[in-house]
Image (cartoon, rainbow, N blue to C red):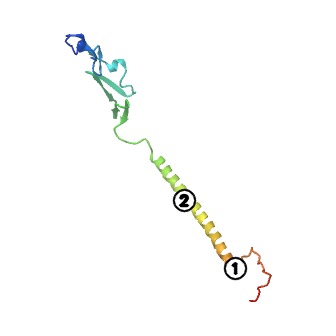
């Protein structure tokens, strides 16, 4: 079957000729349609149905599925995600628990720091129970 006959005027005009995508042949004398379905180069997914067209092919999916040519796969037309709400709640609860633990750790660190600062300030003005009073012996001169 000659799909694209070319006039044979001279060899110079036929150099670099090739068939367009979806066709096979020498590009000069003949270009025949490639049956992608028969050669099993298209529509490889399990739910796909292949139909050969002139220079290309068409894939369709059974049921309520939509064919995606870029990925050669069928997807649901409903747009429902595969992720369940239980998984989303686990993520939310995990983040909440991590936030609560972080806040508790922060409060503990702040309290510890503040306690040490308060003790340091109070130690300047009055001795604490666990610190012994140091008596200063010596002369003060003529005071």
Horizontal arrangement in the rendering, residue 87 relative to residue 28 (left or right): right
Residue 34 in the image, given as x and y percentages of width and height: 30, 18
Residue 72 in the image, given as x and y percentages of width and height: 37, 29
Which residue is painted at 57% across and 62% down in the image? 106
> Which circle marks residue 19 in the picture?
none
Q: Which residue is mark 2?
A: 100
Q: Quadrant of residue 140?
A: bottom right
**Taking 81 as reference, is 31 above or below it?**
above
Q: Quadrant of residue 135?
A: bottom right
Which residue is painted at 37% across and 35% down in the image? 75
Q: Nearer the viewer, residue 93 or 103?
A: 103
Foreground label between 2 and 1: 1
Q: Nearer the viewer, residue 119 or 40?
A: 119
Residue 67 in the image, given as x and y percentages of width and height: 34, 32
- Secondary structure state at the residue bearing disc 2: helix
Which residue is painted at 58% across and 64% down in the image? 107
Residue 24 in the image, given as x and y percentages of width and height: 30, 16
Horizontal arrangement in the rendering, residue 79 relative to residue 138 (left or right): left
Can residue 55 be seen by looking at this rendering? yes
> Which circle marks residue 126 in the picture?
1
Can residue 63 be seen by looking at this rendering? no
């Amino acid at each position: 079957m000659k799909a694209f006959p070319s006039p044979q005027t001279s060899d110079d005009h036929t150099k670099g000729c090739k068939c367009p995508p979806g066709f096979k042949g020498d590009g000069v004398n003949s270009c025949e349609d490639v049956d992608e379905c028969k050669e099993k180069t298209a529509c490889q997914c399990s739910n796909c149905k292949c139909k050969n067209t002139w220079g290309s092919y068409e894939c369709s999916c059974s049921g309520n599925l939509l064919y995606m040519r870029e990925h050669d796969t069928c997807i649901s037309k409903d747009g429902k995600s595969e992720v369940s709400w239980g998984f989303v709640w686990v993520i939310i609860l995990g983040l909440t628990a991590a936030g609560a633990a972080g806040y508790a750790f922060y409060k503990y660190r702040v309290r510890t720091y503040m306690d040490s600062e308060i003790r340091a300030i109070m130690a300047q003005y009055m001795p604490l129970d666990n610190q012994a009073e140091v008596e200063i012996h010596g002369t003060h001169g003529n005071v």
